[in-house]
Amino acid sequence: MTHEQWLTLLSVIDGEKLDPIPVGFIIDSPWLPNWAGMSIREYYDDEGKWLEANLKALRTFGDIIFLPGFWSEYGMCTEPSAFGSRCLWQDNELPFAEAIVTDIARIRDIRTPDPRTDGLAPLVIERLRNCQPRIQAEGHEIRFAVSRGPLNLATFLMGNTEFFTGLYTAPEAICGLLEIITDYTVKWIQLQIETFPAIDGIFVLDDIVGFINDECFREFAKPYLARIYQAADVSVRFFHNDAPGMVCAPHLAEIGVNLFNFGFEHGLSDMKELTGGRVTLLGNIPPRDVLASGTPADVQTSVTETLASVDDRSRIILSCGGGMPPGVSTDNIEAFLTASRKDQ
C-alpha cells in the first residue's frame, strides 16, 4: 500500500467523506495466482512469482486499495501448521490443513507454538523480508499484520462438527483451546509488527463467528478477539467475516474493530445501523454471482444499486461481500471502478 492509499484509508476510518468513495478489495491466493497467469502452488512456492503477481495487480489497478497488501500466506495452512496440522497441497487448488484433535480430551496436550520457529510462519516472514526492498522500491510498504481468527483456527484443528458440538458438551475444554490459540495469535501478530515497523494495522479473518448465536459469541469469540486487537497499538483494526454478520456486528466497536468486511447478504445501511456508524464498512456486492460470474453490465448495476441503498456515505469503502473470489476478470474490476465514480 502506498503512503497516499494509507492516508486515504485512515481518512475514511476517521469519518471523512471522500469523493469519489474509495474502492478496495481483499486479494489473496483464491484469485490472484490464476488471474496473474500462474498456478496456486507456483504462487506459494516461488517468492518471485508471488511478488510478480502482487505487483501486476497494483500496476493494473492503481486506483484500488488492495487489502492487506502483499499478503504473504499459504491459504488456510499458515497458522494450523504451527500446531502440527498436516497440510495437503495440490497444483492449482487451495491447500487444506487436516484436523489434529481427534478426541476433545487431546486439547490438554496442545502447547502454544512459537511463530518464530513453528510451521509455515517463519517462511511467511522470510518471504516478506526478502521481497521488502522491491516492495519499497515500488512505493509501497507492508502495513498489516495478518492472522486467521481463533474460532477459524479451532475448527481447522478440531473439525467443524466437533468444534460446534464442543461448545455445548465441553465448553471449558473449548475455552482452554481458544486461550492457547489466542496466545499464539497475539505472539504471531506481535512478531510481524516487530519485524516490519511500517505495520500499523491488524487484519483478522474469522468466518466461524457467523455460525454462532449471541450468547456463544459473547463467551467464545468476543473476549479472544478483543485480546487479539489489543495486541498492539495500531491505527487500523480490520475484521473479515463474510458468513452471517448480524451477531458480531453490534460488538465490533467495543472489541476495537474499526474496519469490517462482511457478507453480501447484509446491506450497507443495515450494517451501519448495527455498528452504530462507528465502524468503516468494506462492501458490498455479491462476490461470486456478480463480480466473478456476471457481465461488466451486471457489475455496474450492482455497484450502482449498492450506492443508492445508503444515504450516509461516510465510513464506506466500496468492495464485494468477502475477498476477491476466483475467476474475476480485469473487465469486471474495471466496470466496478467505472460504476463507483458515477453519480458521486
Image (cartoon, helix red, strand yellow):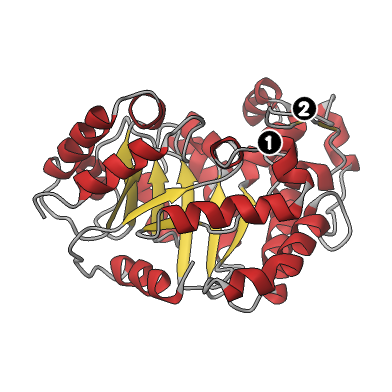
Q: Residue 276: percent from the left, percent from the top? A: 25, 54
The kind of secondary structure element at disc 2 is loop
The amino acid type found where label 2 is placed reads Gln
Pointer 2: what residue?
A: 90
Picture disc at residue 40:
1
**Image check: 3 left or right of 202?**
left
Q: Residue at x 84, y 25 (%)?
A: 103
Residues 324 and 79: in front is 324
Q: Residue at x 42, y 71 (%)?
A: 6
Instruction: Tell me the tag on residue 15.
Output: none
Asked if residue 82 shows in the view, the reply is yes
SS category of the residue bearing label 1:
helix
Q: Position of residue 247 (x, y in %)?
A: 39, 38
Vertical arrangement, residue 293 with respect to residue 216, above or below: above
Q: Are marks 2 and 1 in contact (CB under 8 Å)?
A: yes
Residue at (38% x, 59% y) in the render? 253
Residue at position x 47%, y 62% in the image? 237
The quadrant of the image that shows the C terminus is bottom left
Direction from residue 97 to residue 247 in the image, left or right? left
Indicate which disc, 2 or 1, sits on the residue closer to the N terminus.
1
